[in-house]
Image: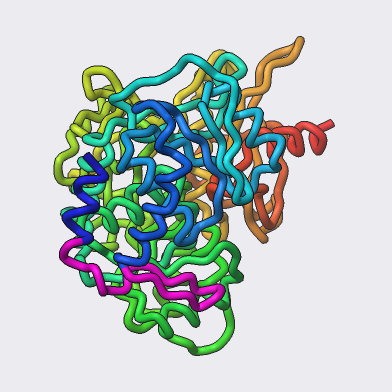
Amino acid sequence: MLGMRWEKTLNRNKRRVVLIEADHNIIWTAQALNDKADEFLEILRSQRRGAKIAFCLPNGALWVAFFLSLQKLGLAAVPLDASLPDQACLEIAQKLRCKALFLRGKFHLLDNVRGNNQAICCIKITSGTSAGLPKTVPCRAEHLIADGSNIIRTMGIRPNDCNLAAIPFGHSYGLGNFILPLILQGTSLVCAGRFVPRQLIDWIGLYRVTVFPSVPAIFRVLASMPGNSRLSPLRLAISAGAPLTADVAKAFFERYHLKIHNFYGSSETGGICYDRRGDATLGGRSVGKPLAGVTVTANRGIIQVKGAAVATRGGRWCMPDRGEWNDKGEMVLLGRRGREVNIGGKKVHPSEVEQALRAVPGVMDAVVWVASNSERPCLLAAVETRLSLAKVQKFLSIRLPEWKFPKHYLVTTEFPRTVRGKVDRASLLEAVRTASG
């Protein structure tokens, strides 16, 4: 189905430039991209329909061409993170029962005889593991098409827009905001395997970029860059993958006179909520309202998502985050769901403390855990800020009673993050434990 949608887009855009590899200044028309995809067909034709094919490629024309070739043949694409070592790619492909792995320009056949599902077109690999296996989300073409269509409609992505792709194509965010708009309507891409933030500013002007989906870590760096450069003709900056603080949104707006729009989603559901005007993001108020085509409910803090893009049986998914609606009908995230801790006979939820810490002026992010020991449970907190702990606690006292304060803190100017832009919670927790003794 995705292959057929691409053919329709191709027929309307054969000579049009649809992809630019900015790090090498290589330009690809839709026809050239399709010709490259057809070259891959020769090594893939022997695979049975529905076979899982893993591939590890950086953002670029080869990634898109290989993905298109898999869709043309009805094979299930399993995109792996380009930062993974070769051995890790091989182990993941084996564990997921892939029939083959495309790695460093070579096609490796794997000795797996089971696992075909003709309905699956793509398998997203998400953070975490399940039963020793990478956590996966098998998607049918209709899931991806629905997600791409919801994003295009809600965000106002146009066929003549140009996306700057600074996040991996294979992540759910990248698929929905880059690959699907390209396949469905020919929205062009500017991408690079590697880059530094200064290059992003230059590429926006050089290649006439109009839409920039990214993550808070990149927006924070861009907001703090010296100089008076502008981002013309950029009209839309989108942030997802992790919480974006109001401080970063305000600093970016003051520096570039452009609002950032919060975007909330997951691998299982695709896009969920979006701040259409950017005001909710600028004020640190919420992640916006549900996307067109998506139904969201919040009952006692539990967020449930329903829609054609939800890649689960029944088309429903309960998020691991807690949330509630504000008086403007916007979704306010309250942190991760998890167990409460009883302190002095009173209960407190870690997400409540996280929310209060993130509201402290000058705090970029915060994570709070429940720690149990032989005596009694307590809270551990990591705070990303340049403020001193004393100043953080002073501001925190305005929002919380002292008995809700974490017992141990780690204050650092920068959290460890994964390639997806998310906080590396495992590494951060280990640092907190070490610091607390």
- The residue shown at (38%, 41%) is 70
Closest to the observer: 206 or 61?
61
- The residue shown at (26%, 74%) is 15
Task: Give residue 333's position: percent from left, percent from top.
Answer: 37, 39
Task: Give residue 323's position: percent from left, percent from top.
Answer: 34, 34
Task: Give residue 117's position: percent from left, percent from top.
Answer: 35, 21
Residue at the extreme right = 437
Q: Please state, as top left, top right, bottom left or bottom right, where the C terminus lies in the image.
A: top right
Total count of labels: 0
Residue 36 to residue 397: above or below: below
Which residue range is magenta in the image? 11-29
Residue at the extreme bottom = 228
Closest to the observer: 283 or 9?
9
Closest to the observer: 25 or 70?
70
- The residue shown at (56%, 28%) is 128
Whether residue 278 appears in magenta in the rendering, the answer is: no
- The residue shown at (38%, 37%) is 266
- The answer, for residue 211, to whether it is visible in the render is no
Task: Give residue 300's position: percent from left, percent from top.
Answer: 30, 22
Closest to the observer: 174 or 391?
174
